[in-house]
Amino acid sequence: MENFSDFDMKNLFNGLTEGRELAKQLQIHLNVSSSSHKTSEVLVEKILNSYDQALSILKYGVACGETQQGGLRIGTSDSPRSNSGSPRSDGSDHEFKDQDTKEGSKKRKAMPRWTQKVQVAPGAGVEAHADGYSWRKYGQKDILGATYPRGYYRCTHRRSQGCLATKQVQRSDEDPTILEVAYKGMHTCSLGAKKDPKTAMDQEPNIAEKPQQILPQSHQSQPELLDFQTTDLDTKNETLQPLNNNPSSSSSRIIPENDVFSAEMMDTNIYYPSFMSSEPNYLTFLPSFMNGDYGSSSNIVHTSESNAQTVGIDYPFGQLDLDSNFPFDNPRYFP
DNA sequence: AGAATTTGACCTTT
DNA sequence: AAAGGTCAAATTCT
């Protein structure tokens, strides 16, 4: 791994610190205006907490170098979905195996990875998920413990343009109307380079996939539950092509649910709350692909192996799961 | 005919 | 060894 450059470090800290301050102010404001938004308040607290966590991680987990033994470690999100009760009870193994703490060891793949939960109509098929990209199915597998099979898709332009983006779609066990979509790799195809997901989704929802009927909702698009995570990013990411685009105009949709930001999060996840979203100030130090708007709508749901968490935040991304290899000092992500 | 999907075999990772 | 992921021939769709 590498360390942050001074510049990135500074930006990161500034952003976090500022974000925290803002959240604080919001909290105060809420108290004064006798707002009945109790949930909002809770949310704010959680945001604050998340900032603290992030700061801590930066302080001890990343900045300190390779060994983040003490539990502070930037997520090595193995399985993005294991949240749906998989019978696999082999207890959270994979503790802190130094998967890359070896100095010279080079990881083989450098692919950003994140998951998204999309709710579709009860009867809608799995393909009922148009994200604006052109996908080609190349496999399907029955997953142990999962009632629904997992579909494997890769960008249609893989051969023609060498676009390595892939995604896996699986229907949620608990809620069949929710599709868990795990993306891996950025689009390097013309479609991905020219159109950002947001544009594609908002303006041309049927670029590639059939515009399946997504819930007979009124005009409001279905909420998409996000769980953005990034893993296996190598310092010398080869083909990563950030999707530069503006964050969506967050259409707030808060769904207070179970706890958020528990202490366990430090175990394998790092949460990147609101500051990651629309504020340009904060975006300056964020990987551009994180702005890819895969959640113009916005129910952010994070589910980790240890604890399923649901966050409802007015931002497209509620949480990130970064691999300890994330190239924080890579200029491509931190322009 | 060409493109996309299906599906069992094969390869990879844990 | 087994679960997950990918390949590729067969099949279906355009």
Image (spheres, coloured by chain):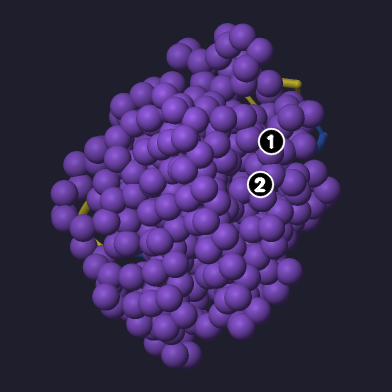
Chain colours: A purple, B blue, C yellow
Which amino acid, mark 1?
Ser
Mark with earlier residue (1, 2): 1
Placement of A213 over or under A232, stated as above or below: above
What kind of element bears circle 1?
loop
Q: Quadrant of the C terminus of chain A?
A: bottom right
Q: Please report the residue visible at 21 percent of the width from the left and 62 percent of the height from the top.
A: A93
- Say which amino acid is labelled 2: Ser
Q: Which residue is mark 1?
A: A249
Horizontal and vertical percent for residue A229? 49, 54
Q: Quadrant of residue A200?
A: top right
Name the one closer to the observer, A32 or A140.
Answer: A32
Is residue A235 visible to the viewer in this orientation of the structure? Answer: no
Q: Chain of mark 2?
A: A
The spot of residue A117 in percent (x, y) is: 48, 35
Q: Using the rendered view, name the quadrant where residue A149 is placed.
A: top left
Q: Can you say whether A11 is above or below A18 in the image?
A: below
Chain at tag 1: A
On whether disc 1 and disc 2 are found on a single subunit, the reply is yes
Residue at the location (34% across, 49% down)?
Answer: A261
Q: For mark 2, what is the residue? A: A278
- Can residue A105 be seen? yes
Q: Nearer the viewer, residue A124 or A74?
A: A74
The percent position of residue A61, horizontal first and vertical second, equals 39, 75
Say if A216 sits above or below A164 in the image. above
Which secondary structure lies at badge 2? loop
Dots 1, 2 in contact, CB < 8 A = yes
Query: Picture coordinates of residue A162 (x, y %)?
Result: 73, 58
Left or right of A329 in this view: A53: left
Residue A256 sits above or below residue A94 on the image: above
